Amino acid sequence: MQITLVEIIDYLGTFAFAVSGIRLASQKEFDWFGAFIVGMVTAVGGGTLRDLCLGMSPFWMTQWI
């Protein structure tokens, strides 16, 4: 299995969305579990929105990872 440059950029984008969600949760003084949930929702939601704007299927529907 070989990872392409597009997949690496995709993973970095998802990570960036998660970090932005966790930073927002820490500003609102959420606990660790709340910050985790907000980070996951932001990462998946941000990636889904990006894919829909590009006219692609959302990444969580096409990739198992």
Image: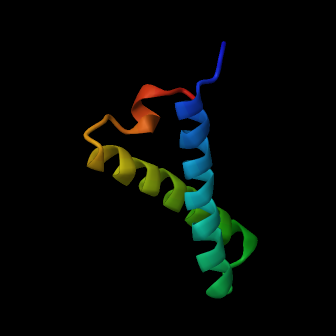
The single residue placed furthest to the top in the displayed view is: 1
Colouring chosen for the image of the structure: rainbow
- In the rendered image, residue 20, in percent from the top left (x then y), is placed at 59, 68
Residue under the point 59% across and 78% down? 24
Instruction: Give 57 or 2, whichever is nearer the viewer.
Output: 2
- Residue 11, percent from left and from top: 60, 42
From the viewer's perspective, is residue 22 above or below residue 59? below
The foreground one among 13 and 22 is 13
Measured from the top left, where is residue 61 in percent x and y? Answer: 40, 32
- Measuring from the top left, give residue 33's x and y in whole percent: 69, 67
For the view shown, which residue lies furthest in the left direction?
55
Q: Is residue 22 left or right of residue 41?
A: right
Q: Residue at x 66, y 63 (%)?
A: 36
* Quadrant for the N terminus in the image: top right
Q: Residue furthest right?
A: 32
Is 23 on the left or on the right of 53, as rendered?
A: right
Up/down of 41 relative to 57, above or below? below
Q: Quadrant of the C terminus?
A: top right
Is 55 drawn above or below residue 1 in the view shown?
Answer: below
Q: Which image quadrant is residue 35 in?
A: bottom right
Q: Residue furthest bottom?
A: 28
- Which residue lies at the image location 61% right of the left edge and 36% below the top edge? 8
Left or right placement of residue 20 versus residue 62 in this view: right
Total marks shown come to 0
Residue drawn at x 45%, y 49% is 47
Q: Quadrant of residue 39?
A: bottom right
